[in-house]
Amino acid sequence: MKRILKGAVIVVGIVLVAAAGFAVLQVRAFNASMAKVYDVPVPTIVRSSDPAVLARGKHVVESVAGCASSDCHGPDLAGGKPIKFGPIGTVFGSNITPAGHGGAYSDGELARLILHGLKRDGRSLLFMPSPDINWLPDDDIQAVISYIRTVPPVTKPDGANEIGFLGKVLDRRDMLPIDVARRIDHDHRTTAPAPVPTAAYGAFLSRTCVGCHGEHLSGGPIPGAPSSMPIPKNITKHDSGIKDWTFADFDRLLTQGVKKNGEKVNPFMPIETLGRFNEVEKQALWSYLESVPPVAFGGR
């Protein structure tokens, strides 16, 4: 019996050492990837002062792109509140007003940041949802940049982003997208079709849902997330999801933050952004959700 126990202890020890070695390699790979300088040219996009362009930029910033949410750059774009992911790390949305990065970056550099997730020095950003919004056409990118130039400058330092050991491992295992640039095809860019209330356009809008609800939109615990973080719901037409929902139910969720059963949604749900979707965007997103294959809760 002692011999068996001793053997078991040795095996467990070997497994633990191997696991620790694997994790260390993943962390090193993450650090090396974040240090990489990408050779991506700066686009030739120039701001506009056209009122219609500025109005479109304001809408995109406050709705589709989600820049003005409290968890991102904040309502005044001077930096959002910290998002604490427990052992994964803590991230902050930066100050992008003219007194912050909005003033430090050229128009082209801002366009590259949005489309490719790259800082001025060519290195990757953390958590920037570029893969979720780089389908926006050049007109919208120009509109966003133009609007950012018009917001009041706010002098406010950025918070310090801190990515823990676990966060780095999860990123390298493709379980949590932290390193942005390595997930983007910098040579080929796909843009959305015309903004019409169709599932084809809604598929692009739904990219902002994937981070929480999963690739299949069926929800379930986010890998590595602390227990205090709410578990995303299933938003497919499955029995465990929104099978019996109508567009009216969906519209009320987005505009009022109220579920079909009358309960308020968890504040983690970005209602302040989704509630600003226009009718075309809401109808398009709903059309896409209706077309998604139903998946049982937790399939991510």
Image: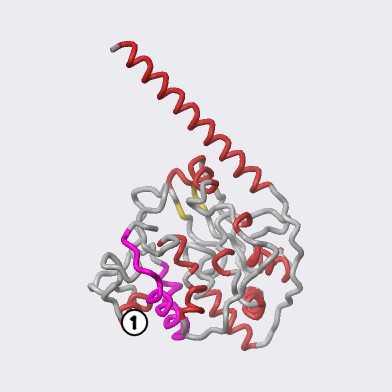
Identify the residue at horizontal 40%, vertical 49% (top origin): 225
**Which element type, helix, strand or loop, lies under badge 1?**
helix
Within 10 Å of disc 1 (Cα), the crowding (few <14, some 14-19, many 20+) is: few
The residue furthest left is 261
Colour setting: secondary structure
Seen in the picture, residue 51 relative to 108 is either above or below; the reply is below
Frontmost residue, 260 versus 120 = 260
Residue 207 x/y as whole percent: 50, 68
Does the stretch in magenta take in 164?
A: no
Prevailing secondary structure of the magenta residues: helix
Identify the residue at horizontal 60%, vertical 57% (top origin): 183
Identify the residue at horizontal 40%, vertical 78% (top origin): 286
Region of the chain picked out in magenta, as a range: 270-297
On the rendered image, what quadrant is the C terminus found in? bottom left
Task: Tell me the amino acid under the disc marked 1.
Answer: Phe
Q: For residue 247, what is the image quadrant?
A: bottom left
Residue 200 x/y as whole percent: 50, 78
Identify the residue at horizontal 74%, vertical 61% (top origin): 40
Q: Which residue is disc 1 drawn over?
A: 247
Does the stretch in magenta take in 289?
A: yes
Left or right side of 145 for 10: left
Residue 77 x/y as whole percent: 56, 68
Q: For residue 132, what is the image quadrant?
A: bottom right
Residue 150 x/y as whole percent: 64, 77
On the rendered image, what quadrant is the N terminus found in? top left
